[in-house]
Image (cartoon, rainbow, N blue to C red):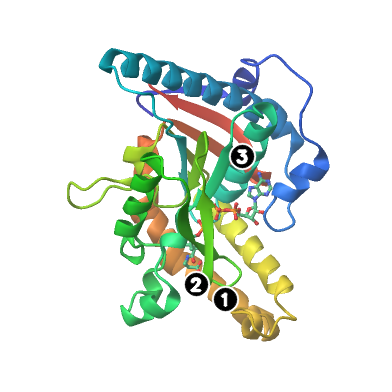
Amino acid sequence: MRNYTEFSRQAWAALTPKTELAVTNEELAKVKSLGDQLDVKDVDEIYQTLLNYIHLAYQAKQATAAKKAEFLQLPESKVPYIIGISGSVAVGKSTTARLLQLLLTRYYPDLKTQMMTTDGFIYPNQELEKRKLMPRKGFPESYNMQMLRDFLQDVVSGKNDVVYPLYSQELSDIVPGRYGHVEKPDILIIEGINTLQLPESGQLVTSDFFDFSIYIDAEEDLIEKWYMQRFKKIMKMKKNDPSNFYYKLANGPEDESLRLAEETWQMVNLVNLRQYIAPTKERANLILHKVEGHLIDKIYLRGF
Ligand SMILES: Nc1ncnc2c1ncn2[C@@H]1O[C@H](COP(=O)(O)OP(=O)(O)O)[C@@H](O)[C@H]1O
Ligand SMILES: CC(C)(COP(=O)(O)O)[C@@H](O)C(=O)NCCC(=O)O
């Protein structure tokens, strides 16, 4: 990849002197999405260097902002340092975002770190059905981008309590009447498949608000495997919940539900990955490349 410096896992880990791990296995267990084990080795070898790098960039931004405010004779305003995380459906964006939030909070307790996902800006299923967009869920047109832009504008203008809608993977829909809150964080992590996408016209885009962006990358076959594993776990969890979206599927013939998930991967998520997500990879500041078992084997940093 042009414009990126490639680091092997070992070379990346060597950039940070080994320190005592500040998180316990129990805390890591809480971060995992649906019953997977997070590898402590990754936290040790990948995330410590990543945290140090992010903190360095955060401090540099603060210092520059202070100098600019002094020059302009304006008061310094508190704006969050925004980190965007992108990548395919099921590549591990939300798990990475939760882990980063935990680690940033632990290593830099004076900084308030929050995280959120852009999934909440997908139109509710009812609206998608009305617009005949159900088979296009996750594609650019299935998001209310104006609402996402307004939300980001409010966040960067330093508003106190900025709310956003919540999406549930298990409901496969927006959760009615429930909202997340962004309350003047120092660092805000925003994950979502569309975080690096460009609009058709010259409007502001999500990444215009980012200070740092990460793309999580892996081979298509592997992501498909992770998607199917997550699907099977959701099926198991929802077997006894008649009110759930997946209840009927979870209690029908297994081969049929697996075939449906496979079809959804092939016809929806893989198409979306190829057409709209993967082409944004080289807009990211950092690419984390994952292999079997979600282990990160290579790190690419842009601009060096
Ligand atoms: N580092 C990891 N180690 C183990 N399992 C992981 C890791 N990252 C993600 N997973 C698993 O992979 C699946 C997809 O991850 P998730 O974070 O839900 O992806 P995304 O937010 O990109 O859709 C989930 O079942 C999750 O538990
Ligand atoms: C809401 C999503 C677009 C986002 O997925 P995520 O990156 O959070 O896994 C995705 O989960 C989705 O619903 N895709 C549509 C097809 C499907 O049901 O998988």
Q: Are marks 2 and 3 in contact (CB under 8 Å)?
A: no
Q: For the residues carrying marks 2 and 3, which lies nearer the camera in this image?
A: 3
Q: Is residue 141 left or right of residue 1?
A: left
Position of residue 101 relative to residue 266, above or below, is above
**Viewer-proximal residue among 239 and 83:** 83
Q: Are marks 1 and 2 in contact (CB under 8 Å)?
A: yes
Does the closest atom of ligand 2 sit within 8 Å of the Cβ of label 2?
no
Which quarter of the rendering shows the N terminus?
A: top left
- Helix, strand or loop at label 2? It is helix
Residue tagged by mark 3?
101
> At x 37% / y 69%, what residue is drawn?
136
What is the x, y in percent for residue 203?
A: 21, 48
What is the x, y in percent for residue 161?
A: 48, 50
Q: Quadrant of residue 232?
A: bottom right
Q: Is residue 137 left or right of residue 239?
A: left
Position of residue 7 relative to residue 240, above or below, is above
| Image label count | 3
> At x 49% / y 19%, what residue is drawn?
59
Residue type at mark 1? Answer: Arg
Q: Which mark is residue 263?
A: 2
Residue type at mark 3? Answer: Gln
Query: How far is disc 1 from disc 2 in space, using C-alphas?
Result: 6 Å
* Dot placed on the residue nearer the N-terminal end, 2 or 3: 3
- Helix, strand or loop at label 1? It is helix
Which quarter of the rendering shows the C terminus?
A: top left
Residue type at mark 2? Answer: Glu
Query: How far is disc 3 from disc 1 in space, using C-alphas?
Result: 35 Å
Residue tagged by mark 1?
259
- Helix, strand or loop at label 3? It is helix
